[in-house]
Structures are given as C-alpha cells and as structure tokens.
Amino acid sequence: MNHPDTEPSATSVSSLPRISRRHALIGLAALLAQAGFWSNPLSAAMQAPASAPAAGLAPATMLFYTLSQTITGHRDLSAATAARIEQAMRSNVPGFAERLPQLGALLVTGQEAKTLLAAATATDAALRELALAIVAAWYTGTVAGNAAQGTKSIVVAYAEALMYRTVADGQVVPTYCNYGPLWWLKAPPAVRVSAPVEPKPVPAPATTGTPEPKGKQAK
C-alpha cells in the first residue's frame, strides 16, 4: 500500500481522465446555472453594452438569438454577436443544425432560464448539453473546438462576454481602462472631502476649593 505522503507514480497520473476544454466550458455553464448567475439581480442592474438591432436576421439566427436571451437571462444581448456565435457553433458543435429547432420548440413566452433547461433535460440530454454550450459561449465569448474532430476554438467576442458583467461593479474588462484612452492626461476629478470641523471648546469643570483630607475636621 502506498504511503499517503508519497508522490503519485507516472502510471497513476497518466491513468487519470483528461478533461477537454469543451467539457470544461460546459461544466462552467452548469456551475453558473447552479449558482444563480443567470438571474443575478446585481448583474441585471449593471449597464450593458448597446445591443445591435435584431431586425434583418435570418430565421435560424433569430431563433438562436431568442434562445440565447432566454437561456442566459439577458434580454439586451447583441444580435450581431449572436449571429457570430451561431455561425461558430454550426462549425464546432456536432448536430447543432438539427438540435437548434428542437431546443427552440421548447421555448415559451416569458420563460425563465431554469425552466427551459429543465424542459431540455427532460426531452433529451443532448438538448441540455446544447443549452449549456450556448451559455458557455456567451459567458466566455468563445465557442470551444474539438481536437478529435480537428476543430479549433473560435473567439467571437471579448468585452461583450457575459462573465465580465458579474464583476462589472468592481472590475473592468482586462486591458480596458476605467475612463477611456489617455485618461491620465485629463485633470483629476475634484476631491470630495468635507471641510474640517473646528472642535468646540470644552469648559473646565467647576471647582469648590481644596478639599479637606478625610479624617480631619475643621476646628
């Protein structure tokens, strides 16, 4: 029996299962669903980038756009980004063209993300996987590839990735600055510090003379 402090052998390490990036992203989407990020009120209250108009989208792209709004819980998604994600998923996700209408058939007006996910799970495990893959693509801005099938990951968005909205109250998108380019050349903002308050003089306590020592009485 191996001692618990000994390092694992090369054989035991090589026997561990390898997790693909695609499955890691799908796992991330599942964790986001369990943690409630899809319906995070703080995330919804944050200012989102202006969305491109959805008019003029092809029917399949419009379906994907509507699915994305429901499954992510964000109604202000960019239609242009949705078109790029849909095109990338057609290239990288096997069976996407067949399963997209099946997932769309489960849509109901005013539906919540968890309700759509539950319906997809009850219908077909492959539809649940597609729904989570859509969430992963929107949150990471990347459609994962599959090395076994010879496809590479496709980056479709950066600043619009939804993962940056959940921390937008305390962190900007990496490589982006808070106040625009060359912000340091502008005059610094006014310091909002209140004027100092002068302390009021404290009157000295009243005195009644020198007290007599205890045990002595005046004669």
Image (cartoon, rainbow, N blue to C red):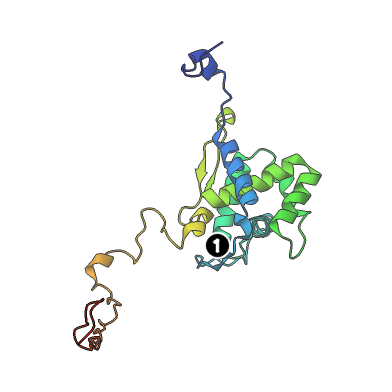
Q: Residue at x 60, y 50 (%)?
A: 32
* Looking at the image, residue 210 lies above or below residue 172: below
Tell me: 135 left or right of 180.
right
| Quadrant position of the N terminus in the picture | top right
Question: Quarter of the image holding residue 25?
Answer: top right
Residue at the far right in the pictured view: 123
x and y, in percent, of residue 171 in the image: 41, 58
Report the amino acid beneath label 1: Ser
Q: Which is more toward the observer, 149 or 129?
A: 129
Q: Which is more toward the observer, 95 or 176?
A: 176
Tell me, yes or no, if residue 87 can be seen here. no
| Quadrant position of the C terminus in the picture | bottom left
Residue at the far top in the pictured view: 1
Q: Residue at x 61, y 46 (%)?
A: 31
Tell me: 77 left or right of 126.
left
Question: Quarter of the image holding residue 12?
Answer: top right
x and y, in percent, of residue 42 in the image: 55, 64
Tell me: 69 left or right of 101.
left
Read off the residue under disc 1: 43
Q: Secondary structure at mark 1?
A: helix
Q: Crowding at label 1, few (<14), some or many (≥20) Cα neighbours within 10 Å?
A: many
Q: Residue at x 71, y 60 (%)?
A: 112
x and y, in percent, of residue 98 in the image: 73, 44
* Looking at the image, residue 143 lies above or below residue 80: above
Q: Which is more toward the observer, 30 or 137?
A: 30
